[in-house]
Image (tube, rainbow, N blue to C red):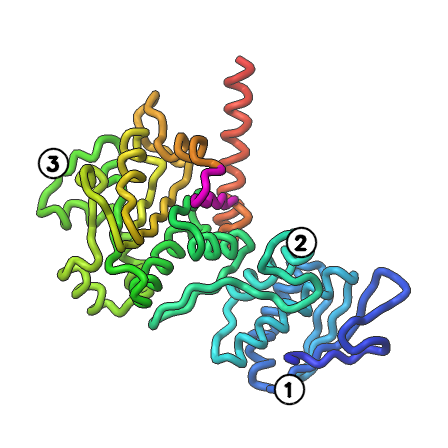
């Protein structure tokens, strides 16, 4: 047991005749308790802000007051984070935010298979030798589990939700485990047309700027020298979408990023490259299509045509899943609501 609860009723299930709940959690390790609460108790203040509770530190204990539901969400959050510290991890603001989201989801989404109501939080994770990434939102949790079980996964939604980063992490994990022999990274190199011949340099130099987010994620998962050697050896391959026609991609983890900027024919061509013992991950944001007016996005069409097809998982992120700066989520919501109003006006006109 991580935190010891001191209450007048049950030690782990406080009961009061009203909707107000009050209990004390005590953590045995003083250093871990200090890290858990955060500098100047900033993590507890975040709990208060997000859950509308009162959380006051007293040494290695915290007094929590609020309604029954939110105080128990706070307890699950703190228990999970304390256990993370015990296992040698650290607790940053983003970890607290993620744990709170998952604790709330335990009550809001009882059908979510990775949650246990009124119990410990269980978050899916991706592990490589260099780094372990733990889901920070219920949708990230669902995405990681979809990547584990499905041969073709679509991860769609706004920027900052982790869809590309987690896809690369999963591919690196498969490569390290020996489940695949190579990683293939692809992306529409030029938003409208892929005229790679007009760019300077060899093929790698032409497409590198467009694949930088994928490279950055790879370097986070695998030591830089190993990434460079793997690219030289062809174990990690940069495959511009325009040059994949006619290939069969077997024994590989294949990622197509920024898929909203593929045409219908490009998307069909890419999806039909899937070979034996291969895993394919397609990521994109349908709200950020840069194709010429009148050209239908291959991603949008694929999501319509392939919904419900056996062996294919589609995970849709929203602005509530943004794990960058909290302001990013609010920016996405502002743009989405503005465009939604503009579309309504256009239809009415």
Q: Position of residue 11 (x, y in %)?
A: 78, 78
Task: Give the label, 3 or 2, closer to the camera.
Answer: 2
Magenta segment boundaries in residue numbering: 308-318
Q: Which sits earlier in the primary sequence, circle 3 or circle 2? A: 2
Residue of label 2: 110
| Mark 1, secondary structure of its residue | loop
- 315 in the magenta segment: yes
Task: Give the label, 2 or 1, closer to the camera.
Answer: 2
Residue plotted at (37% across, 54% down): 167
Q: Is residue 194 left or right of residue 73?
A: left
Q: Is residue 28 left or right of residue 227?
A: right
Residues at marks 3 and 2, CA–CA distance in whole angstroms: 53 Å
Residue plotted at (24% across, 58% down): 182
Farthest left residue in view? 201
Towards the viewer: 305 or 140: 305
Q: Is disc 2 in contact with disc 1, using a CB cutoff of under 8 Å? A: no
Q: Is residue 227 left or right of residue 42?
A: left
| Mark 2, secondary structure of its residue | loop
Picture quadrant where residue 49 is located? bottom right
Residue plotted at (78% across, 80% down): 6
Above or below 106: residue 32: below
Farthest front residue in view? 276
- 93 in the magenta segment: no
Residue plotted at (71% across, 77% down): 25
Residue of label 3: 198
Q: Which sits earlier in the primary sequence, circle 3 or circle 1? A: 1
Above or below 85: residue 114: above
Residue of label 1: 28
Residues at marks 2 and 1, CA–CA distance in whole angstroms: 31 Å
């Amino acid at each position: 047991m991580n935190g010891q609860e001191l209450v007048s009723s049950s030690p782990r299930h406080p009961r009061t005749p009203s909707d107000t709940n009050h209990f004390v959690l005590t953590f045995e390790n003083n250093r871990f308790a200090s890290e858990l609460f955060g500098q100047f108790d900033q993590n507890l203040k975040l709990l208060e802000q997000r859950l509308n509770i009162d959380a006051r530190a007293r040494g290695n204990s915290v007094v929590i007051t609020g309604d029954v539901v939110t105080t128990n969400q706070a307890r699950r959050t703190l228990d999970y984070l304390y256990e993370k510290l015990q296992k040698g991890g650290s607790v940053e603001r983003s970890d607290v935010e993620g744990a709170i989201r998952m604790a709330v989801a335990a009550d809001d989404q009882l059908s979510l298979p990775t949650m246990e109501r009124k119990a410990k939080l269980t978050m899916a994770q991706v592990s490589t030798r260099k780094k372990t990434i733990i889901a920070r939102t219920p949708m990230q949790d669902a995405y990681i589990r979809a990547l584990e079980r499905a041969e073709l996964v679509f991860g769609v939604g706004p920027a900052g939700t982790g869809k590309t980063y987690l896809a690369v992490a999963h591919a690196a994990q498969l490569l390290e485990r020996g489940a695949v022999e190579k990683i293939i990274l692809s992306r529409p190199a030029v938003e409208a047309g892929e005229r790679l011949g007009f760019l300077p340099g060899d093929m790698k130099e032409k497409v590198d700027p467009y694949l930088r987010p994928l490279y950055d994620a790879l370097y986070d998962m695998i030591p830089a020298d190993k990434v460079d050697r793997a690219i030289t050896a062809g174990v990690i391959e940069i495959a511009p979408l325009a040059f994949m026609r006619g290939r069969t991609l077997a024994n590989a983890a294949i990622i197509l990023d920024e898929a909203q900027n593929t045409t219908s024919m490009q998307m069909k061509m890419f999806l039909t490259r899937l070979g034996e013992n291969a895993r394919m991950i397609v990521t994109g944001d349908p709200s950020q299509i840069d194709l010429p007016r009148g050209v239908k996005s291959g991603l949008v069409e694929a999501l319509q045509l392939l919904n419900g097809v056996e062996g294919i998982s589609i995970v849709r992120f929203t602005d509530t899943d943004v794990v960058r700066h909290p302001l990013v989520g609010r920016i996405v919501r502002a743009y989405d609501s503005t465009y939604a109003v503009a579309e309504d006006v256009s239809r009415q006109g």
